[in-house]
Image (tube, grey):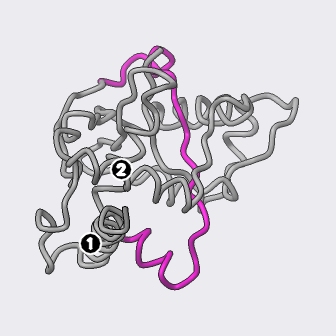
Amino acid sequence: MPFLVRAINREYWPEPDERDIKARVLELNSDALNDFFKTSDNKMSFWYAEDNTDVDEAILAYLGSMDKWVVMEKRGEFERQEFILLPEDKIPSGIEIQKNPNHTYIKDYEIRHRDLANLNVRLINELAALFIKTLDNNNGMKAVSKTHIKSMFIKAVKENKITSSNIPKSDNGALRKYISAIEEEIESTKKAM
């Protein structure tokens, strides 16, 4: 089953309970809306995973598109990132899923990007209900530790899906340094063998 994957701050969202979903949506903390429902041109950005085995690649595409998380990790403010996994077939009708390649430094993963388009307040309300239902289901989230993230990037570097030389110093310097350190670690391991 295909998923649309997006980073989430779980602390902003309600814990599972038996109350009506519509009531829970109306009680959402405004920080959840500000954090999660950032849109541009009435579109919300996600990364595509073909199935459960493909989720790490969608997460890698997301993490490879920015260095904010690397900066936070360097400051000791990042231990893990949580992601919501929305079943593609549960996206409310009226929302268009657009295949819009987007920037990531992971080679060939740009095509994994999807936009949920034509959003308005009614559809965002329906999406919020879907998010809450998905979070209520323990299989609807994936928390990824910084250790696991590093292992995903080590694998990507070994497979030549990302290199520090392809990341401009001016744009994402922290990500470039992170990948460079991984490349050096791999090289020194090879020399030690």
Q: What residue appears at the point 59 percent right and 29 percent down from the top-left corner?
A: 130
Per the rendering, the mark at residue 92 is none
Circle 2 residue: 62
Residue extending furthest toward the right: 18
Q: Find residue 133 and report its image quarter.
A: top right
Foreground residue among 172 and 179: 179
Q: What residue appears at the point 58 percent right and 78 percent down from the top-left corner?
A: 77
Find residue 151 and report its horizontal and vertical position in percent.
47, 53
Looking at the rendered structure, the kind of residue marked 1 is: Ser
Find residue 17 and report its horizontal and vertical position in percent.
86, 35
Task: Please report the bounds of the magenta region as a residue range.
Answer: 68-96
The answer to whether residue 82 is above or below residue 22 is below
Instruction: Indicate yes or no whether the magenta region holds residue 94.
Output: yes
Per the rendering, the mark at residue 180 is 1
Could you say whether the residue bearing mark 2 is in a helix, strand or loop? helix
Find residue 33 and report its horizontal and vertical position in percent.
54, 54
Instruction: Indicate yes or no whether the magenta region holds residue 163.
Output: no
Residue extending furthest toward the front: 193
Foreground residue among 51 and 181: 181
Q: Mark 2 vs mark 1: which is more N-terminal?
A: 2
Looking at the rendered structure, the kind of residue marked 2 is: Tyr
